[in-house]
């Protein structure tokens, strides 16, 4: 290799040190961190905060009062009504243009998020981030163990590649959980804005409680999935650790 590509000895030493550090960290993750984490998450799934049976307990009050209806009519005579009708025809169909209440400021100050769900989300997000980071470390370790490409004797290499693919899939799924949380906040904010603009429409208020309940159920499923992913990765890597660390058997081993 040195004859084909000249590598600075100092850089090579640093790269080798990096490989050793990743190897030590990844092996500790698989052997110790993964099983401990799955037990922690299994215990978390039994916590009362995530096992509320009556979903009404997580509802958040929407402190936006319904104003008294105001009837405005400037059509005093037939001539003005005729002119108004003409303006509607020029502007297009006005029947589907519903204008709500103009909102300059919330009556009770800032409209708060659902505090119970925010607290739960703040406990779940670090767990998602941890899984992504640890998977990335283990994935790098397995990738560094993949030998150079050769003809034949690649069964162990295929196991390494499947392990990397599984780790990459877990990373992607965990990242999607963060996207789901962001979409919840955005959707809820849009609905609360609708309530402020159309305070007389009860369906908007009911929809907010529905998405709160949906998010609570989703968070419990996320914690369950995080636990299951730790179990799956730990089990998969341990069962194939020999092929992962030694993907190709030597000719001497093949004789016996």
Image (cartoon, grey):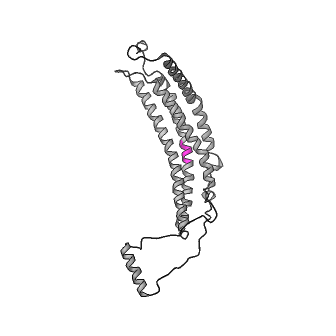
Choose top left, top right, bottom left or bottom right for residue 81.
Answer: bottom left
Choose top left, top right, bottom left or bottom right for residue 36.
Answer: top right
x and y, in percent, of residue 249 in the image: 43, 18
x and y, in percent, of residue 10 in the image: 51, 17
Viewer-closest of 32 and 141: 141
Total numbered badges shown on the rendered structure: 0
Q: Is residue 18 left or right of residue 95?
A: right
Viewer-closest of 105 and 23: 105
Q: Residue at x 41, y 80 (%)?
A: 84
Vertical comparison of 173 with 110: above or below: above
Vertical comparison of 121 with 251: above or below: below
Q: Residue at x 49, y 38 (%)?
A: 171
Q: Is residue 15 magenta?
A: no
Vertical comparison of 47 with 23: above or below: below
Q: Report the magenta residues as a range.
A: 220-225
Q: Residue at x 57, y 65 (%)?
A: 104
Q: Quadrant of the C terminus?
A: top left
Q: Residue at x 63, y 50 (%)?
A: 119
Viewer-closest of 4 and 48: 4
Q: Is residue 152 left or right of residue 118?
A: left
Which residue ends up furthest to the right in the rendered image? 48
Viewer-closest of 62 and 253: 62
- Magenta stretch, main secondary structure, is helix
x and y, in percent, of residue 252 in the image: 42, 12
């Amino acid at each position: 290799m040195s004859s084909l590509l000249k590598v600075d000895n100092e850089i090579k030493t640093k790269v080798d040190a990096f490989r050793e550090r990743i190897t030590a960290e990844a092996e500790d993750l698989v052997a110790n961190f993964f099983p401990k984490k799955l037990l922690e998450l299994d215990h978390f799934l039994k916590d009362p905060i995530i096992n509320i049976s009556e979903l009404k307990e997580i509802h958040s009050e929407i402190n936006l009062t319904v104003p008294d209806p105001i009837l405005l009519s400037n059509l005093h005579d037939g001539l003005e009504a005729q002119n108004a009708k003409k303006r509607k025809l020029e502007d297009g169909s006005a029947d589907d243009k519903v204008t709500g209440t103009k909102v300059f400021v919330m009556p009770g100050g800032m409209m708060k998020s659902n505090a119970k769900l925010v607290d739960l989300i703040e406990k779940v997000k670090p767990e998602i981030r941890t899984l992504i980071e640890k998977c990335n470390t283990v994935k790098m370790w397995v990738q560094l163990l993949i030998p150079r490409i050769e003809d034949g004797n690649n069964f162990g290499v295929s196991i390494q590649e499947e392990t990397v693919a599984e780790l990459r899939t877990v990373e992607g799924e965990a990242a999607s959980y963060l996207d789901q949380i962001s979409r919840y906040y955005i959707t809820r904010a849009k609905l609360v804005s609708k309530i402020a603009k159309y305070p007389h429409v009860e369906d908007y208020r009911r929809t907010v409680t529905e998405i709160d309940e949906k998010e609570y159920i989703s968070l419990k499923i996320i914690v369950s999935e995080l636990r299951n992913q730790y179990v799956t990765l730990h089990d998969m890597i341990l069962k194939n650790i020999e092929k992962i660390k030694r993907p190709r058997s030597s000719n001497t081993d093949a004789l016996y």
